[in-house]
Image (tube, rainbow, N blue to C red):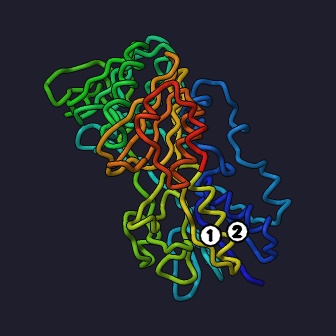
């Protein structure tokens, strides 16, 4: 009986094994996860769950019974230490498990602050796992003082939740502006104003020099400009990196993650990869997407290809971020844009449209689901409307979709 093993029990891993069963695969299926809980959603961790608005059980992607009911061997709290590609086996502690096909859905890992600058002090947190949030939550209380390092979406979302809980938040970003690596100045300006309205102090163009502590506990920070602040806890929101250690040790080819072809197959014909950890062909290059939609869609394509189909994965990039009462929805990828078209809304909504010459690349829509949906459909169809039509609030967006 054929045995498919999936290493990594996150969104991609859970989606992959479910798709195998839904598509009629009747061989053995094993899903291995390092955390001691069933696969769960990550986006609500730093928002609804941290706020206390969601219980842990509601985070689970599927009830634990789903795996047993579908004859999926779910191994929780199990760490794979090595893969023997030639013997087609992997090691879980002292256990050796054989496979016919292997899928790596190992996700990504948060970058941590270096120990040399105090990153190992007690009270310094990252925001990635259920255990991370459970450790952080007791600190997020009214009147506490927090330093958030990093002005990307991870840091800004953490700042929003902390501010809503009454925490005095200072956020530092060493780049010239928040969101500099991922968004236009217009989007940066929007979210800077939003956070300042909610009492967050944002320091741009200044990095963290070091953290200071009382014994092993963090108590303050010295910034790169020499200024000092007192803190009760620190959140590092300095990005994530693909989790590729297992693949690297096994000799699988890496390229900004685990390199896969259009079908999700790695350099080893019996090993596949999907989700945050995988880089794949896209247009004339290669990308790696860190998003829930990509994890689900790519994993489902890989599942079907593991069963013998030949389906090329066609990525449709989209993302979202919730901060305070604002939902940001992003369609497309803005890499290479040279100008922004602003579409004003009714005072509570706005959207920014990224163009490269006459080509529409991406849309950032704040509390404007219609702009997001129309933009997404235009980008997927390869259509680029006249920028003047986009900028004119009298233009009915859906008319731009007509042939």
Image quadrant in which you'd find residue 286: bottom left
Residue 127, how many percent across, how many down?
47, 38
Q: What residue appears at the point 39 percent right and 24 percent down from the top-left corner?
A: 190
Task: Report whether 41 appears left or right of 327.
Answer: right
Nearer-the-camera pick, 235 or 319:
319
Q: What residue appears at the point 42 percent right and 47 percent down from the top-left corner?
A: 360
Nearer-the-camera pick, 192 or 368:
368
Residue 226, how many percent across, how many down?
13, 25
Specify few, some or many for label 2: CA neighbours under 10 Å numbering under 14, 14-19, or 20 or more: many
Q: What residue appears at the point 37 percent right and 16 percent down from the top-left corner?
A: 196
Identify the secondary structure beneath mark 1. Answer: helix
Location of residue 46 with respect to 304 vertically, above or below? above
Residue 254, how many percent across, how many down?
39, 71
Q: Which residue is mark 1?
A: 302
Q: Is residue 123 visible in this depiction of the protein? A: no
The nearer-to-camera label among 2 and 1 is 1
**Residue at mark 2 to residue at mark 1: CA–CA distance:** 16 Å
The mark that comes first in sequence, 2 or 1, is: 2
Q: What residue appears at the point 63 percent right and 60 percent down from the top-left corner?
A: 13
Nearer-the-camera pick, 145 or 377:
377
Image quadrant in which you'd find residue 178: top left
Identify the secondary structure beneath mark 2. Answer: strand
Kindly identify which numbered label has been placed on residue 30. 2
State the quadrant of the N terminus: bottom right
Q: Is residue 377 visible in this depiction of the protein? A: yes
Residue 21, how many percent across, how many down?
79, 67
Location of residue 385 with respect to 96 vertically, above or below? above
């Amino acid at each position: 009986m054929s045995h498919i093993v999936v290493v990594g029990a996150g969104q991609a891993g859970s989606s992959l094994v479910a798709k195998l069963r839904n598509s009629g695969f009747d061989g053995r299926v094993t899903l291995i996860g390092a955390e001691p809980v069933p696969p769960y959603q990550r986006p609500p961790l730093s928002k609804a769950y941290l706020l206390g608005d969601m219980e842990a059980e509601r985070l689970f992607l599927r009830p634990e019974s789903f795996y047993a009911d579908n004859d999926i061997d779910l191994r929780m709290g199990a760490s794979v230490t090595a893969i023997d590609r030639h013997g087609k086996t992997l090691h879980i502690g002292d256990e050796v498990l054989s496979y016919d096909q292997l899928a790596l859905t190992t996700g990504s890992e948060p970058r941590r602050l270096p120990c040399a600058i105090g990153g190992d002090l007690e009270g310094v947190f990252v925001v990635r796992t259920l255990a991370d949030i459970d450790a952080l939550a007791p600190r997020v209380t009214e009147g506490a003082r927090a330093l958030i390092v990093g002005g990307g979406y991870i840091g800004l979302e953490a700042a929003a939740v902390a501010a809503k809980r009454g925490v005095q938040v200072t956020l530092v970003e060493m780049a010239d502006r928040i969101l500099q690596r991922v968004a236009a100045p217009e989007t940066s300006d929007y979210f800077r104003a939003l956070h300042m309205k909610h009492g967050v102090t944002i320091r741009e163009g200044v990095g963290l020099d070091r953290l200071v502590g009382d014994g092993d506990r963090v108590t303050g920070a010295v910034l790169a400009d020499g200024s000092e602040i007192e803190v009760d806890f620190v959140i590092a929101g300095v990005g994530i990196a693909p989790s590729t250690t297992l693949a690297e040790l096994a000799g699988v080819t890496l390229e900004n993650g685990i390199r896969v072809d259009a079908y999700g197959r790695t350099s080893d014909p019996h090993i596949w990869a999907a989700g945050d950890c995988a880089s794949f062909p896209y247009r004339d290059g290669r990308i790696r997407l860190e998003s829930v939609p990509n994890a689900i869609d790519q994993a489902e394509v890989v599942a079907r290809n593991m069963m013998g189909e030949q389906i090329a994965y066609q990525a449709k990039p989209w993302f979202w971020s919730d901060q305070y009462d604002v939902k940001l929805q992003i369609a497309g990828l803005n890499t290479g844009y040279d100008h922004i078209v602003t579409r004003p809304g009714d005072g509570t909504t706005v959207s920014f449209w990224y163009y490269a010459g006459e080509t529409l690349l991406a849309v950032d829509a704040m509390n404007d689901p219609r702009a997001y949906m129309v933009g997404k459909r235009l980008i997927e169809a390869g259509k680029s409307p006249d920028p003047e039509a986009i900028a004119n609030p009298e233009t009915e967006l859906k008319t731009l979709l007509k042939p």
